[in-house]
Image: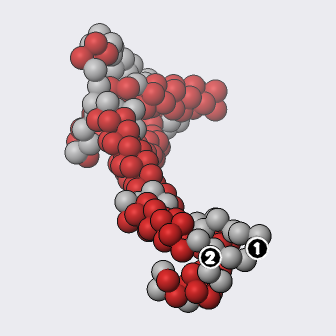
Amino acid sequence: MATIAQAAAHICCSRSQFDQYLAEGVITRQPSGKYDLDQVRREVLAHLRSVAAGRGGAAGNNLTEERTRLVAAKRRREERRDAFEAGQLVELESVCRCLEETLVSMRNRLLNLPGETAYLLAMRRQEECFQVVDDAVRAALEEIADPAWTAARMTAAGFVSKIDETHKGDHDDKENDISDVA
């Protein structure tokens, strides 16, 4: 049986390292303060082997945690990629550009209304003017609400949509029904 200092010297470590092994439970603490050198050596070597294999110790726990986080991150990345390819996710930049194009097109269409209706309003009563402007606004809003109108603007802007073939013909039978305002 050996003292702590002798046991530490036997495994070629400092007294503080030996104390750390005791605190971590690597070496079984002896109440008498006397240690079997063979047992101490076996416990320390078993601990060092498990650390080297990535299974034990503080360094081993960190390595295992890092590997777990890496695998989880790769899994999440693959899940996002699969969802994107399935059309369940979109790039935020593309959505923003699409909305911007739509809103600019809507703005331009609505700003054109005064020029389209001005010649119709000359020398008319207020009720007739209201009806002409109201009809023009409603026709423009119906045009804007038509998915074909938005799709045409997006296609012109270079946006590509991933629409299932089953839904492709849903809006083909709708026509732009813009009646003359007069």
Residue carrying label 1: 32
Q: Among all residues in the image, which is located at the extreme front?
A: 1
Q: Camera-side residue: 48 or 174?
A: 48
Circle 1 residues within 10 Å: few <14, some 14–19, many ≥20: few
In percent of width and height, residue 174 lies at: 33, 13
The amino acid beneath tag 1 is Ser
In percent of width and height, residue 113 lies at: 45, 40
Q: Camera-side residue: 154 or 4?
A: 4
Is the Cβ of the residue at disc 1 closer than 8 Å to that at disc 2? yes
Q: Would you say residue 90 is visible in this rendering?
A: no
Q: Quadrant of the N terminus?
A: bottom right
Task: Answer left or right for 40 relative to 23.
Answer: left
Residue plotted at (44% across, 68% down): 45
Q: Camera-side residue: 30 or 17?
A: 30
Measure the C-alpha gap from mark 1 to mark 2.
Answer: 10 Å
Circle 2 residues within 10 Å: few <14, some 14–19, many ≥20: few
Q: Camera-side residue: 132 or 138?
A: 138
Residue plotted at (29% across, 35% down): 85
Q: What SS does tag 1 mark?
A: loop
Residue plotted at (45% across, 57% down): 55
The amino acid beneath tag 2 is Met
When the figure is inspected, residue 46 is found, relative to residue 76, above or below; the finding is: below
Residue carrying label 2: 1
> Image quarter for residue 102?
top left
Residue plotted at (50% across, 83% down): 10
